[in-house]
Image (cartoon, grey):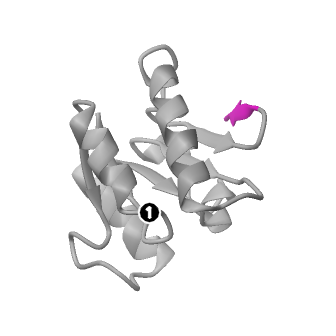
Amino acid sequence: MLFKIDENLPEEITEILNKSGYDAVSVYQQRMKGYSDSALYKVCQNENRILITLDSDFGDIRTYPPQNSAGIILIRVHNQSKKNLIDIVTLLMLKFERETIKNRLWIVEENFIRIR
């Protein structure tokens, strides 16, 4: 699976995904910091990458339809410390092989994941 890590997430998430056998790049690595949401969405579409983000704008399925993308993982948690975000993504990796991400929006909250 191919992932793009948004600029609002710790760079370590990119490293963790890569070490686990996934292909992950960050917005920082590609010098895309400051890109608009719509530009980032289009880049993810063109690269066939699943976007992992904290940006709640990507939860708007009319503006960013998941069915037209490789998938979107929106993390919506109160504790956005680096450690907590890394822990969440580490736990999410257990679900990647069991649940389809392609063309879906995953909304990751404190105690559950909603999939649209």
For this rendering, which residue is in front, 17 or 107? 17
Residue at the extreme front: 83
Q: Tell me the quarter of the picture where residue 7 sits.
A: bottom left
Q: Looking at the image, is 82 positioned above or below residue 91? A: below
For this rendering, which residue is in front, 81 or 55? 81
Residue 84, horizontal then vertical, whole percent: 61, 50
Q: Kindly identify the residue that appears in the image at 63 percent across and 51 percent down.
A: 75
Residue 53 part of the magenta segment: no
Q: Kindly identify the residue that appears in the image at 48 percent across and 63 percent down.
A: 9
For this view, does 58 lie left or right of residue 25? right
For this view, does 50 lie left or right of residue 58? left
Residue 78, horizontal then vertical, whole percent: 77, 58
Is residue 37 visible from the viewing direction of this image?
yes
Q: Looking at the image, is 93 positioned above or below residue 19? A: above
Residue 113 part of the magenta segment: yes
Residue 45, horizontal then vertical, whole percent: 33, 54
Span of residues in magenta: 112-116
Q: Kindly identify the residue that appears in the image at 23 percent across and 41 percent down.
A: 18
Is residue 65 visible from the viewing direction of this image?
no
Q: Which residue is mark 1?
A: 10
The N terminus lies in which quarter of the figure? top left
Residue at the extreme top: 98
The C terminus lies in which quarter of the figure? top right
Q: Looking at the image, is 21 positioned above or below residue 43? A: above
Kind of element beneath mark 1: loop
